[in-house]
Amino acid sequence: EASNFANPILSRCVSIMKSAFAAASRSTDDAHALEFEFVICSLDLIAGIAEALGSSLELVAETKELPELVTHSMKETRQDVRQSAFALLGDLARAGVSRLNEPEVMEVVLAEILRGLDVRFVNVCSNATWALGELSVMYYRKNRSSPFGPHLEASLSQLITTLQSPMLNRSLLENTAITLGRVALIHTQSLAPALGSIIQPMCLILRNIRDGQEKEDACRGMCAMVKLNPEAVGPSFLYFSDCVASW
């Protein structure tokens, strides 16, 4: 099986990352930069394996150490390291890695995601936003509850602010619209009052995204908000109809 080949590769990546973090803590700046090139390569390689294996990733023994290493990477100051870390986090969530389901891990991860929702660092912000959507879906499917805890209000506020900034990077806006829709499936009552200010940009973005699970989740979340706040759709009904017709 593919997991048999993945195990030694993941083991080597984990070893490289551990060594790099240890070496970086006692090295000069130039050596520090070199060490983290290895971390980025390892994060990206693991992300590719996670995407290929999907739910089978749990069969690989080294998976248990990944959430801690990803969290460590998300806390780094280098933006390229954080960018790769958030991308891997989303892939691990999509694969349903059970360690992410543990409350103490989720708390740390959500705090780092919230810190990553900073539009000054577009690629980091885009990956953190996407990872938040994947994590929300994964956690809700397993627990039928919200993973957000005290981070809900701040997360929604930042996502809404980003969505209302049409001049930002296209990929960032797409990930923001998808994640807001996914969060709306869980926190419909929290997001429905804001529907009037987000439905037009959501529809404009979602209509141009290719059909798939992400778009379906986002549109279902939007429709859930419409059920609770139908009056908000009136001024943007044309955009809403256009989005629906885009399927």
Image (cartoon, rainbow, N blue to C red):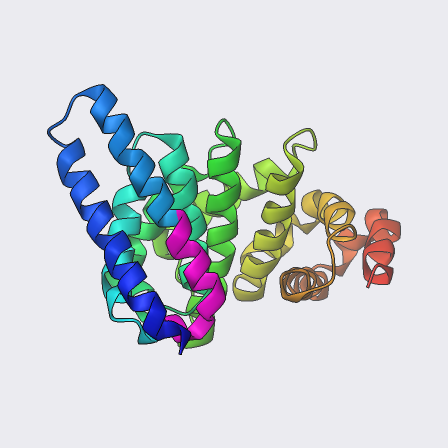
State the residue in front, 116 or 10. Answer: 10
Q: Which residues make up the magenta segment?
A: 44-57
Q: Residue at x 47, y 74 (%)?
A: 141
> Dividing the image into 4 quarters, which one contains the N terminus?
bottom left
State the residue in front, 15 or 194. Answer: 15
Above or below, 141 relative to 38: below
Q: Residue at x 70, y 62 (%)?
A: 219
Above or below, 81 relative to 246: above
Q: Do we see residue 89 in this rendering? A: no
Whole-percent x and y of residue 115? 38, 38
Q: Which residue is most to the top?
A: 29
Above or below, 115 relative to 209: above
Q: Is residue 18 found inside the magenta-colored segment of the image?
A: no
Q: Which residue is most to the left?
A: 26
Whole-percent x and y of residue 166? 70, 33
The tally of labels here is 0
Whole-percent x and y of residue 183? 54, 58
Q: Quadrant of residue 29?
A: top left
Q: Residue at x 24, y 46 (%)?
A: 17
Q: Is residue 50 found inside the magenta-colored segment of the image?
A: yes
State the residue in front, 38 or 194. Answer: 38
State the residue in front, 134 or 187. Answer: 134
Q: Residue at x 41, y 70 (%)?
A: 96
Q: Which residue is most to the bottom?
A: 1
Classified by dominant secondary structure, the portion drawn in magenta counts as helix
Whole-percent x and y of residue 98? 32, 70
Above or below, 124 relative to 53: above
Q: Do we see residue 222 in this rendering? A: yes
Q: Is residue 54 left or right of residue 61?
A: right
> Dividing the image into 4 quarters, which one contains the C terminus?
bottom right
